[in-house]
Image: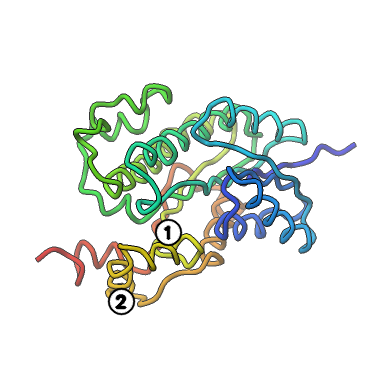
Amino acid sequence: MKKLNVIVVIGTGSIGQAIARRVGTGKHILLADLRRENSEAAAKTLSEAGFEVSTAIVDVSSRESVHALVETASAIGGITGLIHAAGVSPSQASPSTILKVDLYGTALVLEEFGNVMESGGSGVVIASQSGHRLPALTMEEDKALATTATEELLALPMLQPDKVKDSLHAYQLSKRGNSLRVRAEAVRWGKRGARINTISPGIIITPLAKDELAGPRGDGYRRMIEASAVGRAGTPDEVGAVGALLMGADGAFITGSDFLMDGGVTAAYWYGELAEK
């Protein structure tokens, strides 16, 4: 009997599904989310489109939960793909929760799946343009975010409450940390013959983005869109196209990289209309 190739999608929203649709043909897609109703809704959509799917519940901030997901996936077949799109936004959570889910949770997922990824396998982590708006860190801080042992990560002095006082700062640090972590993990994954990259999207129209646009940061979001070179928000399918490149044969020479795709918002933030005068 032929061994199944398994792609694990953590965070079953619009972006995770968009990538899975492009790379999941002929493979088993395991959809994992903190909320069962989210993974089951995604499973219905994908199964009705002809994909072979199953679901699981996962809390990325729990090692026990992430390890259980690895075991569930491994029982189905060889893990050849990882799409990590789970996280919380600045409008949804406290600084400590953001650091635990977005920073520690991503490090945990990279560690656990990096232990089992098949040769020839690949993964993408969804970071954010926010990581590119954080001023440069020191070399020591970069290295700490990239290489500190997962269980010691949240104890770093730079991440303590007296240093990280608001949710946006926590989010920016987490997303910068995601891209740095992936760069370091690419070395370890490479020893298994596998690749891992990050995508840093800008404002992509998803239910989460709509919540942000309707929330206290909505005016800032609209200003970012208006000041960007492209002048519009992005779509999950556009992120899906980049994800498919990074996970597929055309991206075989790309690993440890971060792909910023934000319609030019970051360019405007540093050098255009959004730059501080």
User: Which x, y percent locates residue 169?
Assistant: 26, 46
- Of the numbered discs in the image, which one, if any, rests on residue 201? 1
Q: Nearer the viewer, mark 2 or mark 1?
A: 2
Q: Which residue is mark 2?
A: 226
Vertical order, 95 against 189 (above or below): below
From what the image shows, is residue 271 above or below residue 160?
below
Which quadrant, please, contains the N terminus? top right
Amino acid bearing label 1: Pro
Query: Quarter of the image holding residue 277?
Result: bottom left
x, y (%) of residue 117?
62, 33
Side (left or right) of 133 relative to 107: left
| Residues packed near mark 2 inside 10 Å, few (<14), some (14 to 19) or many (20 plus) | some
Q: Is residue 73 left or right of residue 175?
A: right
Question: Label 1 near label 2: C-beta < 8 Å?
Answer: no
Q: Amino acid at mark 2?
A: Glu
Is residue 208 placed above or below 93 in the rendered structure?
A: below
Q: How many C-alpha atoms fall within 10 Å of the one at disc 1: few (<14), some, or many (≥20)?
A: many
Q: Earlier in the sequence, mark 2 or mark 1?
A: 1
Give 132 or 173, whichever is nearer the viewer. 173
